[in-house]
Image (spheres, grey):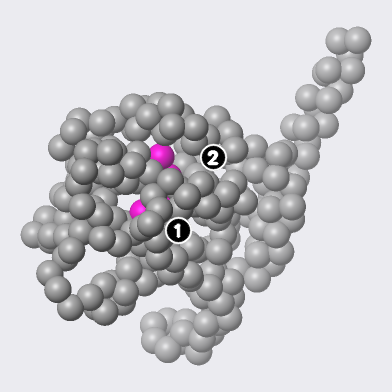
């Protein structure tokens, strides 16, 4: 059984559609919904579902808010306390939950299966993390780079509502590992999401980033926006 691990991003999207074009058998498509995806991503998933019919994209949902602020820890230094808070480089609990969700689903599959992961050729070093597992990387095999994968998706009429023109990655919008420049875009162009991020900041025991809290960034971006506005007024 061939199972496509589908993130919804440019690489996994290109991989899935290219596999179908090449006549490679696809039995199941699994997408993990963190519930913190951009609205444009949900629209993208609908488009892909229409393109891959009669196959169905199986959605595994993670209750991000529960794990973020409600789950009672049963072990470790913070045993008995609520929530994992914002992830960081040492504690990417959200990524771990994605993996566990897929593993649980795969346990329901009795026959031998092969996973297909959308890792591009220019990131092929990432494949070493899964050595010894029954996983294939078609984009690496076909030497398809990230840029080529995105161009292919654009050629198929897929543009994620312009997200890739603003962000390098289009996964969870609340990720503290995002670039400052991208967080500035989130602040300026997605005010409703930024407001939600500010509320999350109040609930997290862990600082959003080692250098900035969400409140710090709000103040920083507001000041920059004000200065830019003043400069534009002075031009006229």
Residue 163 location, quadrant:
top right
Residue under numbered circle 2 = 160
Residue under numbered circle 1 = 88
Residue 229 seen from this side: yes
Task: Report whether 120 appears left or right of 52.
Answer: left
Q: Relative to residue 165, is residue 88 depicted above or below?
A: below
The residue under the point 53% across, 73% down is 63
The residue under the point 83% across, 25% down is 229
In the foreground, 130 or 85: 130
Q: Main secondary structure of the magenta part?
A: loop
Magenta span of residues: 6-10
Task: Report whether 199 appears left or right of 11.
Answer: right
Q: Secondary structure at mark 1?
A: loop
Q: Relative to residue 71, is residue 130 depicted above or below?
A: above
Residue 119 seen from this side: no
The residue under the point 62% across, 51% down is 39
Magenta span includes 9: yes
Residue placed furthest toward the front = 54
Q: Relative to residue 131, is residue 148 depicted above or below?
A: above
How far across and how far down the image is residue 199, in percent? 71, 64
Residue 129 location, quadrant:
bottom left
Which comes before the other along the chain, label 1 or label 2? 1
The residue under the point 35% across, 32% down is 149
């Amino acid at each position: 059984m061939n199972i496509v691990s589908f993130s919804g991003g440019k690489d996994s999207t290109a991989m899935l559609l290219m596999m179908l074009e090449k006549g490679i058998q696809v039995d199941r498509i699994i997408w993990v919904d963190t519930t913190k995806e951009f609205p444009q991503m949900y629209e993208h998933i609908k488009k892909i579902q229409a393109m891959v019919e009669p196959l169905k994209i199986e959605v595994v949902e993670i209750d991000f808010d529960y794990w973020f602020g409600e789950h009672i820890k049963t072990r470790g230094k913070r045993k008995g306390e609520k929530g994992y808070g914002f992830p960081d480089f040492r504690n990417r609990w959200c990524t771990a939950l994605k993996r566990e969700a897929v593993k649980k689903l795969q346990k329901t599959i009795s026959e031998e299966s092969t996973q297909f992961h959308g890792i591009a050729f220019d990131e092929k070093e990432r494949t070493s993390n899964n050595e010894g597992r029954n996983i294939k990387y078609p984009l690496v095999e076909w030497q398809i780079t990230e840029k080529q994968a995105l161009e292919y998706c654009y050629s198929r009429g897929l543009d994620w509502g312009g997200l890739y023109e603003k962000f390098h990655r289009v996964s969870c919008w609340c990720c503290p590992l995002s670039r400052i420049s991208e967080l500035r875009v989130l602040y300026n162009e997605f005010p409703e999401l930024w407001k939600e991020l500010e509320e999350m900041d109040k609930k997290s025991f862990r600082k959003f980033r080692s250098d900035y809290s969400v409140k710090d960034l709000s103040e920083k971006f507001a000041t920059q926006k004000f200065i830019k506005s003043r400069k534009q007024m002075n031009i006229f």
